[in-house]
């Protein structure tokens, strides 16, 4: 369809072609935003004004995660209020349905609910729900700088040396410690090592021309969009997903594995295509693709100059 429009426009004189092209591009932007909105409304959970047994399972689970985490946060405050959380208790009791819920979620909710009662009844903070934080020790500054400044996007990989699954799993596990809104933990990492599939995903992505042939392993970072609720959280998934992607790249770097984030600046139709090709559930939105692997001997990196810190950092003392 796009090709047809472009070829039709190509036959027009430039005084007509340019305004029509501009109009077509604007129209495409409006259509994509509309599709984003419809998808977001269809997938996002019901905000907490409505709760009860009539909530759809993903809305109920999202609400329960928010609520048990409110208890955890409440008990980690410097001076927790006492009593607190009567609305939380009431809502948790109304929503909890162990028979239709994931075991981990049931455990997290029931343990937080019990900790809340214990705090309110006895004034004792539960050690499991709000443990003492670890002592924070500064690392050696030079070592930190050596680690951080040695990360560059890698665009030349050694395909003869695939990264073992165990390392990918460890990096993904570390990435999942990323902060997430109200501990929703919506980020997902899909890993691909099979040649044909990797090539297919790279063909769809397109931003890897010139080095895609060196890529033998890929990740697609996504978010489960059903874990976000209501208007206020409409953009939250992109933030939570991007944090997971960045942490994953840092964790790979810690293992000596190179990576290059690859944009997924695509239409909704292309995202649907990638979901189909890469076996990604419909409820997940795509954050980015990540090419990864051990760098080839003698690989080069792009200079990618940074903006001066005076331009990017502002102290508001
Ligand atoms: C979300 C995102 C998408 C990117 N997409 C591409 C891409 O499609 N192709 C590519 O070669 N590099 C891509 N990059 C890499 C950037 O060009 C690179 O991070 C930037 O120039 C800074 O360089 P550095 O990563 O080496 O520090 C992407 C980076 C990000 C964060």
Image: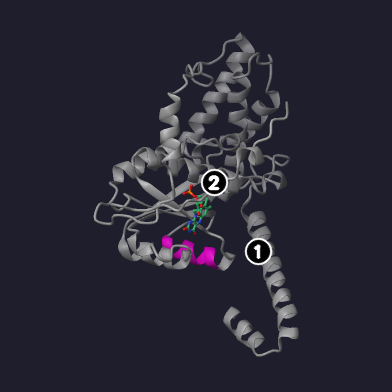
Q: Quarter of the image containing the C terminus?
A: top right
For marks 1 and 2, the one nearer the N-term is 1
Decide: is 240 above or below 74. below
> Does residue 30 sit above or below 2 in this rendering?
above
Closest to the observer, 195 or 298: 298
Q: Was residue 275 drawn as part of the magenta stretch in this picture?
A: yes
Neighbor class of circle 1 (other Cα within 10 Å; few <14, some 14-19, many 20+) is some
**Front in this rendered view, residue 294 or 33:** 294
What residue is shown with label 1?
Answer: 35
Instruction: Give residue 111's position: percent from left, percent from top.
Output: 52, 24
Q: Position of residue 199 (x, y in %)?
A: 37, 65
Assess mark 2: CB under 8 A from ligand 1?
A: yes
Give the overall secondary structure of the magenta segment. helix
Count of marks placed on residues: 2
Q: Nearer the viewer, residue 46 or 77?
A: 77
Disc 1 on helix, strand or loop? helix
**Does 68 appear above or below 193?**
above
Label ID, residue 242: 2
- Say which of 36 and 252 sits in front: 252
Q: What's the residue at 25%, 52% (across, down)? A: 161
> Which quadrant holds residue 88?
top right
Q: CA distance from mark 1 to mark 2?
A: 21 Å
The N terminus lies in which quarter of the figure? bottom right
């Amino acid at each position: 369809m796009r090709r047809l429009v472009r070829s039709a426009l190509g036959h027009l004189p430039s005084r007509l072609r340019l305004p029509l092209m501009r109009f077509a591009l604007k129209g495409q932007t409006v259509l994509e935003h509309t599709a984003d909105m419809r998808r977001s409304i269809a997938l996002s959970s019901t905000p907490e004004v409505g709760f009860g047994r009539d909530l759809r399972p993903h809305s109920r689970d999202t609400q329960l995660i928010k609520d048990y985490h409110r208890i955890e946060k409440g008990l980690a405050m410097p001076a927790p209020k006492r009593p607190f959380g009567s609305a939380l208790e009431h809502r948790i009791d109304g929503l909890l349905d162990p028979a239709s819920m994931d075991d981990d979620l049931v455990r997290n909710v029931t343990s937080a609910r019990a900790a809340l009662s214990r705090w309110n009844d006895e004034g004792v903070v539960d050690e499991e729900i709000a443990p003492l934080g670890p002592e924070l020790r500064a690392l050696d500054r030079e070592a930190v700088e050596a680690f951080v400044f040695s990360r560059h996007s890698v665009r030349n990989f050694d395909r003869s040396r695939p990264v073992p699954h165990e390392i990918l799993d460890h990096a993904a596990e570390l990435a999942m410690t990323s902060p997430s809104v109200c501990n929703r933990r919506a980020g997902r990492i899909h890993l691909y090592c099979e040649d044909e599939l990797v090539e297919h995903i790279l063909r769809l992505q397109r931003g890897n021309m010139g080095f895609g042939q060196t890529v033998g392993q890929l990740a697609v970072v996504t978010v489960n969009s059903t874990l976000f609720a209501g208007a206020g959280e409409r953009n939250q998934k992109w933030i939570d997903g991007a944090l997971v992607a960045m942490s994953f790249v840092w964790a790979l770097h810690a293992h000596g594995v190179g990576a290059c984030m690859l944009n997924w600046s695509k239409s909704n139709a292309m995202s649907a295509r990638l979901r189909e090709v890469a076996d990604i559930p419909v409820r997940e939105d795509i954050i980015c693709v990540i090419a990864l692997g051990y760098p080839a001997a003698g690989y080069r990196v792009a200079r990618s100059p940074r903006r001066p810190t005076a331009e990017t950092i502002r102290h508001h003392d």
